[in-house]
Amino acid sequence: MEALVLVLVGVLLAVGGIWSIRLVLVCAGAGAAWLVADAFGAGLGTAALIAGASGLLALLVGVLAARVLFFVVGLVVGAVVGARLFTILDTGDASVLLAVVFVPAVAVVGGVALERWRERLVGWVTAIGGSALVLAGLGRVDSDVRVVSDPAGYGEQAISVAAWVGLAVLARIVQKRLGGSRRGSSS
């Protein structure tokens, strides 16, 4: 169940995020929180509760901060990317301190980049963040594809990153084919 939720949220973010900033905020906030909670061994109920609260909090912050909406969206999706990178690069001994520094640092980079290059980046940012969640979920659905979710060594890390890049490019192509001209809508 947990894996399918991650895949669904990832697909919504990767493909539908270009049309709704609110959808991006809820999906990315929930996805980032779920990935970090899972990295520290939270149970299904705890991870779902944290993800739901984080998704709503991200939406609330985004609505209240409409003037800096693109920065907030970039910040939240950047947190997804940071959490995904943290899980890919983690060698098995997850450090809370490293997560507390690394994930927000990547989130700030995402926020600054999206604020600066709004229209040109929103499609890519949503495709990258959604793809991260899809791969995290797929690795939990079937142990045969665990390598894309929880890579063990350098070779598996490279495969995981390559799958992430490939899926992000595919998601961006789908966005464009489904009418990416509506980029940046705030609904």
Image: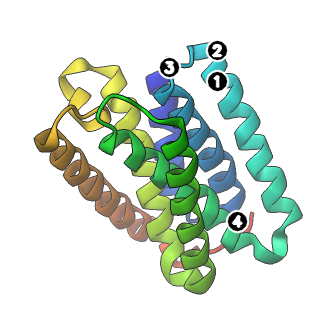
Amino acid type, residue under disc 4 in the picture = Val
Please state which of the two labelled residues, at mark 3 or mark 4, is closer to the viewer. Answer: 3
Give me the residue at 31% from left, 34% from top: 149
Q: Kindly identify which residue carries mark 3.
A: 41
Q: Kindly identify which residue carries mark 2.
A: 45
Measure the C-alpha gap from mark 1 to mark 3.
13 Å
In contact (CB < 8 Å): disc 1 and disc 3: no
Q: Kindly identify which residue carries mark 1.
A: 48
Name the secondary structure under disc 1.
helix
Residue lying furthest right: 64
- Pinpoint residue 136: horizontal percent, then vertical percent: 39, 35
Q: Quadrant of the C terminus?
A: bottom right
Measure the C-alpha gap from mark 3 to mark 4.
27 Å
- Pinpoint residue 31: horizontal percent, then vertical percent: 56, 40
Amino acid type, residue under disc 3 in the picture = Gly
In contact (CB < 8 Å): disc 1 and disc 2: yes
Q: Earlier in the sequence, mark 1 or mark 4?
A: 1
Badge 1: residue crowd in 10 Å (few <14, some 14–19, many ≥20): many
Q: Is residue 22 above or below residue 97?
A: below
